[in-house]
Image (cartoon, rainbow, N blue to C red):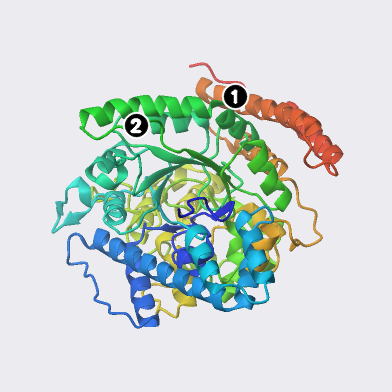
Amino acid sequence: MTNTTPIHSFHIPVMGLAYTIDSPIRVAHFGISSVISITDDELTEKMRAYYCAKYNLPYTEISKKNLNHRAERITQYLNLVNELVQHNFAALKADLINSKTALANYIALLPSSSAIKKALEQFNAENNPNTDSIERYLEEHLMAGDIDVNIMTKVDKDNFHENEPLPVAFNDAHAALRGFAESELHSSVVLSAGMNPRLYSYFENFPDFFPDENGNLKKKIILKVSDFRSAMIQGNFLAKKGLWVSEYRIESGLNCGGHAFATEGFLLGPILEEFKTKKTQLINSAYELMSKALAQKNIPLPAGPLALKITAQGGVGTAEEHHFLLEEYQLDSIGWGSPFLLVPEATLVDKDTRELLIRAKKDDFFLSNISPLGIPFNTIKGSSNEFWKQKRIADHKAGSSCPKKLLALSKEFDPKGTCTASKKYQDMQLELLEKQKDTLSDQNYFLQQNKITEKSCLCVGLVNSAYIDCAIPLKGQQQGVVICPGPNLAYFDKEVSLQTMVQFIYGKLNILSKTERPHVFINELSLYVDYLKKELTTYTAEVSTAQFKKWTNFKANLQEGISYYEQLFAAGHYFKESKAQLIAQLNQFESEIQNLAIPTAVLT
């Protein structure tokens, strides 16, 4: 019987549009799961051309003239990735059979508790190992990592042909989903950025998302969520359509890379605790609703609820934290994202950008407003994208040429949509601002001007690093590189090999510098306190009752989170050496939050 248990207890989440675009080709054969963004079909097409040339495989371009080009490009790229992963996996198994060095290197990647590791060590210790026995064992127990994909549900722009709107199925996120659904992959789609009911309903068109007579799913659904309530609402919505959520991927609201979806002061620890205590409720509720829906669709009902995984990611940075989260909250895997940006074998990052990440200090990582989506976005000071953006602003040419229009979601000036980072949009906004100049103070005018021009072209900036590293020519307006690491990367300051990073995750060695690194929970708490402080000090409008209530709840939720952590650290057997320091840090934040004054609401 073939093993279906994952080899590793960590996964590599999606990073940007391109930083993990080929990660499965790089790491899946080692049993490491990773996530590809399928937002940009032009990127997937260029990467397909790149890998076909690299492996001397036939390639025929899928033209934009084809109305279904977006879905077809994604399907063909995913099929190619799958083919290359299987090729690499077969080659690895052959190496493990024929080379003791290869076998030793593979063993070094495995966690100490792994039964597979113990068995392979026995084979490697034999003077004349039976190659047939090794081959049978590898076939039965080794498995490649998952080739999962990510769709940001909000990036679902309407599309047009000859000025006529195309059907909803040709919307960006819909077409991306179709591209995945029609691929050969047996893996999962990770849905992020909240619920899109129209997109969620589109899943019903694809049989691979429904269970077979044995309760097996060819393609699975993973929801990236930041709280239990959201998970329950979204999971039940899908269950009513006969669709099962196979994993809830809990991400820290602020201690993460890319877009940051801040909670109302709910911290990661209490959120994980709620998922642990209410997991059965989550399963039973969804199974009951799914059963009714499958009966109505005449699809065989599984004998019981399907498997449900709970995983977490965002700011984890030591082996102790990794094992603590797995054990304390009964998690199935931990996401390690930003640190892998420093692993050339795992992610696609150009040399200059990786050097920028290595040199960066804590204060260089910040939560920006550069995203055209209007959602806070984690990035880093000193990026080439910021240089070129500021140069255009100085030359009175603010804004991007907007060649891809993936984020052209504003209908303010054009029913087809305009991106707020585009020159077209910014020119119109600056023109409107100029008409108000006489009524604004110089400071307010400057602030309004900056709000317009600070947006960056993420569609181009987030893929340029991949093009540079793969020597794919950059065309069009110079945008430089946008990189979106989480603040946790401040404590990693060297390029490392894949083996070194994996051994660090499993506690076999240390790669952190001597700079003191705060605990994952403390670091997130600090980010939330700073977030609330900034809101309180920069809010300029009259405080409404709703805003007053939001801030009051935010503060109360932080205080409840601190109380939870105090009990957790006092009672737990983890972090014994740093327990006193952790309690002292919590006390300090508790005092700081207590002294935060919430402005009084203006009654209307």
Image position of 250 (left or right of 532): left
Q: Image point 33% across, 40% down: which residue?
A: 214
- From this viewpoint, which residue is outermost toward the top? 603
Task: State the residue in front, 262 or 222.
Answer: 222
Q: Nearer the viewer, mark 2 or mark 1?
A: 2
Amino acid carrying mark 1 in the image? Asn
Q: Secondary structure at mark 1?
A: helix
Disc 1 crowd rating (10 Å Cα; few below 14, some 14-19, many 20+) is some
Rendered view: 241 above or below 487: above
Q: Position of residue 404 (x, y in %)?
A: 32, 62
Q: Position of residue 194 (x, y in %)?
A: 42, 39
Residue 25 visible in the displayed image: yes
Count of numbered marks:
2
Residue 464 visible in the displayed image: no
Q: Position of residue 239 (x, y in %)?
A: 34, 31
Identify the residue under disc 2: 239
What label does residue 553 carry, if any?
1
Q: Image point 58% across, 53% down: which residue?
A: 10
What label does residue 231 carry, if any?
none
Q: Position of residue 15 (x, y in %)?
A: 50, 58
Amino acid carrying mark 2 in the image? Ala
Rendered view: 297 above or below 260: above
Rendered view: 448 above or below 561: below
How far is disc 2 from disc 1 in space, using C-alphas? 31 Å
Image position of 579 (left or right of 29): right
First of labels 2, 1 by sequence position: 2
Task: State the residue in front, 360 or 195.
Answer: 195
- Which image quarter: residue 484? bottom right
Disc 2 crowd rating (10 Å Cα; few below 14, some 14-19, many 20+) is many
Q: Image point 55% across, 43% down: which residue?
A: 311
Look at the numbered discs 2 and 1 and tell me whether their residues touch, using CB distance below 8 Å.
no
Q: Secondary structure at mark 2?
A: helix
